Image: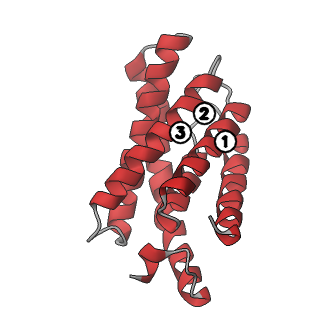
Amino acid sequence: MKTKNLVILALLAAIGFVLHAVMPAFLTIKPDMMLAMMFLGIILIPEIKSVMLLAIVTGVLSAITTQFPGGQFPNIIDKPVTALVFFGLFLALKKYRSSIVSVGVLTAIGTIVSGTVFLTTAYFLVGLPGPFAALFGVAVLPAAAINTVIMVILYPIAQSIAKRTKSSTVSVIEK
């Protein structure tokens, strides 16, 4: 793993941490803004080692800032699962994955997967403060919409930066 890749991943995790820390909670669930940064990191550096490292770091950082009662373990469990699902879908869309529409759809799907895994894990480990469907509708669906908008804005910027710097880390963007 290159130092440059680690720096990119660290910056994305730090940005995600700040976004996650300042996002207000709705019905004790905070929309996970760190997911958008994790997804961007997976798109920029589509290597399994980088994906897993970013997923673990993102899970721990989300656990630190969670306001969900007992949400630490669900955060740590949900990020690697979500990262692997997102990465798998990203690889499966080889022909279309550099499209802004594909990136937006993948982000929405990834956020919904993350919310589902988080709520399911929380349900079994600590219980939920309300009905699953209500929490899903109040936190997961808005987070999916917000993350998709963020990704649609950030992806072209990252793509432009990668092209200008002729980055060897961003194999998807160069193709």
Q: Do the residues labelled 2 and 1 touch (CB within 8 Å)?
A: yes
Residue under label 2, please give it.
30
Looking at the image, is 169 positioned above or below residue 71? below
- Residue 20 in picture, x, y percent from top left: 67, 43
Task: Classify residue 101 as left or right of residue 2.
Answer: left
Residue under label 1, please give it.
23
The Cα atoms of the two marked residues, 3 and 2, are separated by 15 Å
Secondary structure under tag 1 reads loop
Please report the residue visible at 47 percent of the width from the left and 46 percent of the height from the top.
83
Question: In the current view of this chain or complex, which residue is farthest to the front?
Answer: 1
Q: Quadrant of residue 32?
A: top right
Q: Quadrant of residue 166?
A: bottom right
Looking at the image, is 64 positioned above or below residue 151? above
Q: Quadrant of residue 6?
A: bottom right
The Cα atoms of the two marked residues, 1 and 3, are separated by 18 Å
Query: Which numbered disc, 1 or 3, marks the residue that appears first in the sequence?
Result: 1
Which residue is at the front of the view, 13 or 80? 80
Which residue is at the front of the view, 130 or 86? 86
**Callout 3 amino acid:** Lys
Please report the residue visible at 65 percent of the width from the left and 60 percent of the height from the top.
9
Query: Which numbered disc, 2 or 1, marks the residue that appears first in the sequence?
Result: 1
Residue 105 appears anywhere in the view: no
- Residue 109 in picture, x, y percent from top left: 36, 46
Query: Which numbered disc, 3 or 2, marks the residue that appears first in the sequence?
Result: 2
Residue under label 3, please give it.
79
Please report the residue visible at 48 percent of the width from the left and 14 percent of the height from the top.
123
Task: Classify residue 9 as left or right of residue 127.
Answer: right
Q: Residues within 10 Å of mark 1 (few under 14, many from 20)?
A: few
